[in-house]
Amino acid sequence: MEFTNWFDTTTRVAEFEEFLAQFKGKPVSFLQLGAFTGDATTWLLENILTHPDATLTDVDTWEGSDEDAHDAIDFSLVEEKYTSRGIVKSAIESGRLDKFKGTTDEFFKRNVRLYDFIYVDADHTAYGVTKDAVNSYEVLKVDGILGFDDYEWTNARDNSPIYAPKLAINSFENVYADRVKLLKKTYLAWYQKVL
């Protein structure tokens, strides 16, 4: 089965290069909330996390969410595609990639690490993004980068702002105004932790 590669767009790849190039070839730790088929995972492992001690943790339920685009998807096949990628298998076996199957809430209750970069692309409701933003801030190193996917996305099923990331991202930016620096806001939103 073919799956849409939502990562491989000009904007995402260019912005990942723009904000993450500083970490290339360094022993850094990245966290990705929402991994889907592993398109971003593969790109990060091939292009940024090139140091042998660089690590990535992917968190996903591989059960989908309440989005129109997920209605016709068999998520067991999504997970199968993720785990069948050669670079993903190799990185898991070498300990450079940690695949955490569960919710972001479950992950943050167990997590004891700090990260240089965190990408928030899991639950797209304002409530879910708010929780992920607050929890991510707490485990992000000072000067680390926090990226949010789908800033401009809307849920066609219910056009209310509480079912999309933008409200949560804007609220996070306002509440954490003295703790993060806005780097860029397009379809994605990028921040640097300063405090």
Image (cartoon, rainbow, N blue to C red):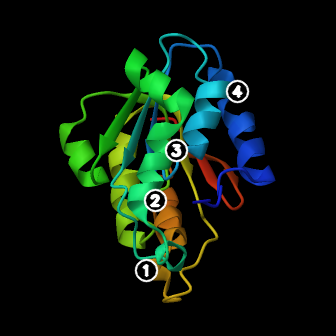
- Asked whether residue 139 appears in the rendered view, the answer is yes
Which of disc 1 and disc 4 is earlier in sequence?
Answer: 4
Label drawn at residue 21: 4
What is the count of numbered marks? 4
Tell me how far mark 3 sits from mark 1, CA to CA.
23 Å
Q: Marks 3 and 1: which is nearer the front?
A: 1
- Asked whether residue 179 appears in the rendered view, the answer is no
Circles 2 and 1: CB atoms closer than 8 Å: no
Tell me how far mark 4 sits from mark 1, CA to CA.
33 Å
Tell me how far mark 2 sits from mark 4, CA to CA.
25 Å
Q: Marks 4 and 3: which is nearer the front?
A: 4
Quadrant hosting residue 86: top right
Label drawn at residue 180: 3
Circles 2 and 3: CB atoms closer than 8 Å: yes
Image location of residue 83, percent across then percent down: 44, 39
Q: Which residue is mark 2?
A: 172
Quadrant hosting residue 126: bottom left
Image location of residue 48, percent across then percent down: 64, 25
Q: Which residue is mark 1?
A: 162
Is 35 on the left or on the right of 103, as rendered? Answer: right
Q: Tag 1: Cα neighbours inside 10 Å, few (<14), some, or many (≥20)?
A: some
| Residue in front for this viewpoint, 169 or 195 | 169
Which of disc 1 and disc 3 is earlier in sequence?
Answer: 1
Tell me how far mark 4 sits from mark 3, CA to CA.
20 Å
Q: Residue furthest front?
A: 1
Say what amino acid the circle numbered 3 marks.
Answer: Val
